[in-house]
Image (cartoon, helix red, strand yellow):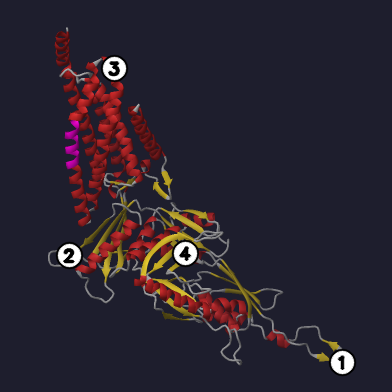
Amino acid sequence: MSRFRGLILVAILVVTSVVVLAISEVSVLGFTRGGDSPLGLTLGLDLEGGTHLVYSIVPEDGRDPTREDMEGVRNIIDKRVNEFGVSEASVQLLGGGVDSIADRVLVQIPGQTGAAITLNFGADTVSAATLEAFFHNELGRTDATVNQNENSSLTVQLDDIQGEVLDADGNVVIANEADAWREAIIAQYPVALQVGYVIPQVDPPVIGDDTTVDAVPTEQTDALPTLEEVEIAFASVGRSDADVDAVDGAEGLFSVLMYGLDISSTDDDGNPILGEEQKIIAALRELGDIQFTSSQGTLTQWTLGGGVQEAKNLIGKTAQLEFRYRECGDVLPPSDDIPWPPDGFSEGVWAVERCSNPAYFNESATEIDASDLDDAFPDVSQGAISRPIVTLVFNDKGGDAFFDVTDRVARQGDRLAIYLDNEELVAPSAQAGIAGGRAIIEGGDFTTEGVRTIAIQLRSGALPVGLELIQERNVDAVLGKDSLRKSLIAGGVGLILLLIFMIAYYKIPGLVASIALVAYTIMLLGVFKMIPVTLTLSGAAAVILSLGFAVDANVLIAERTKEEIRSGRSLLAAITAGFDRAWPSIRDGNTSTIIVAIVLFWFGDRFSTSVMQGFALTLAIGVLLSMFTAFFASRLLLRLLATTGLGDKPNMFVPVRDQSDLGQTSNSVTGGNS
């Protein structure tokens, strides 16, 4: 009965592995395995292809990079890429010789192909079909597909986005495609702006005792800006191309149509500046009190994402976290003789502008230091609508400083601005001081991939030097798709021929070995998918080598069983003794191989040779599993077959070449008994 339980266990493992391999993407206990690759396996750069990135080292103080700088860069990039979920990525230092120091970093990322752009026009002014046609016809990107999201934003999926490539002299060979596309889209789709001025309230003149004039006085009409004045206001901020019209029948209301509205809120150094739309509104306020403004078609979001783009953002960022105290504009006027809110704002608009417009707030440093950060991890907010967030965990010093700052923010009605690499992530308010040393970062345009990238950057620390991407290209698999397909066909044919040989030569033990070998292959691929193990050319070689160990173990068992049968033992006793005699050889040979694999993995980790690590890990897993299938599964199945009618035919358990010896042995045994 125990052997049936053992076979049921093996059958369950095989069936589970088949199910795992049959489902392209498996989600279990919160983690996901698999993908679009064959059987959902994780393939390396040499089998799947990927992205080739070369970065130039740019120390901030203009000095030459030191060996410590370069080693720090390599270690941080390697850590970031591994945490990003890219296995078998290659991070190497380039340049340098015997007496010089490397000054470039090569990063090869397997499988990270494809890119995405999420953009929002502030309203449903551009449809997904219209934008997709623009990418196809005007930008020449026929691979682009555009989908509309629930929040009305649009996501453009692309095979890749070409980054800026420089030649040896530093000249731009290929400009950044994404920046060029952004400018083309801004220029293509107009922004419709409306502005309405408050009509001054002037009491009508009194004629006689009881008679009034119903018409609007001339003084009231003259107080409103004219069309010419509005056009001059646009010209004063460099937008003389704007098409301005006065709306008929609505005094003080103007409609404007313009192309190419720049929404940038920071300069090239990341410092906050007034955006073009804010400059326009400020110029219009000088003409009179604005009652309302509205715009449609403004590009309010432009976020690059996707595998390659997220990896580039992850690698090339210094990840310097800053916490700044933002002192917002005064809620009440500084003195009674100053009109308040300033610049003609209504109280509702001022409540927003005082903390969001750089012209009205001041920022200062806080005692919260980036080194006080103990951990950062992606999460989702709690509530009716779950949003991606980054949770921060501070040490005791950072937790105390965070409480002091948030307490001040809550009492003064100010903000705590959080910056990453001089770019504002979020500027939240607080209802009370936040104790406990835990905080969250939540941004309106945060994505699941984006918060994971930010968390990895914060955990891995800041790069000791700056990085400049000087080369980016997609690389094909070393074998190529056609060669890889032919290699898989050849491997399958070879495996079938091996199984035919084992069955034809070793008969029942060969059949059992073939079944065990098929089960071993299925379970091995299932284990590779669930760990996951990145399969490379070197890993494929390790798989073939471990298959050899599995076959060798079954051959040893068959030969030892044959010898026990020739010595006169019964079939069941011969099978048991054959396994017992073969086990020490199988155990010792495989154990020595596992030790070699451990040494190779240690050297690969020590010298950052991922190819060596992949080979060692694949070999160790394969050898361990081959020991299980050869000694456990094969033994159970062979003993089960021996209890059937096949047990009366010992010649079915002996190799072909030893049939005559078996007959002589059987005759001598029979004669002795008689």
Which is more N-terminal, label 2 or label 3?
2
The residue located at (42%, 54%) in the rendering is 158
Which is more N-terminal, label 2 or label 4?
2
Quarter of the image where one finds residue 660: top left
Q: Secondary structure at mark 2?
A: loop
The secondary structure making up most of the magenta span is helix
Quarter of the image where one finds residue 217: bottom right
Q: Which disc number belongs to residue 646?
A: 3
Can residue 266 be seen in the rendering of this structure? no
Please say if the residues under marks 1 and 4 sit with CB atoms less than 8 Å apart. Answer: no
Estimate the spatial distance between the alpha carbons at disc 4 and disc 2, rounded to whole Å.
Answer: 39 Å
Estimate the spatial distance between the alpha carbons at disc 3 and disc 2, rounded to whole Å.
Answer: 70 Å
Q: Which residues are magenta?
A: 582-592
Q: From this viewpoint, which residue is outermost toward the top?
A: 674
Q: Position of residue 528 (x, y in %)?
A: 32, 43
* Residue 347 lies in the magenta-colored region: no
Q: Which residue is mark 1?
A: 209
Which is more N-terminal, label 4 or label 3?
4
Q: Which residue is mark 4?
A: 302
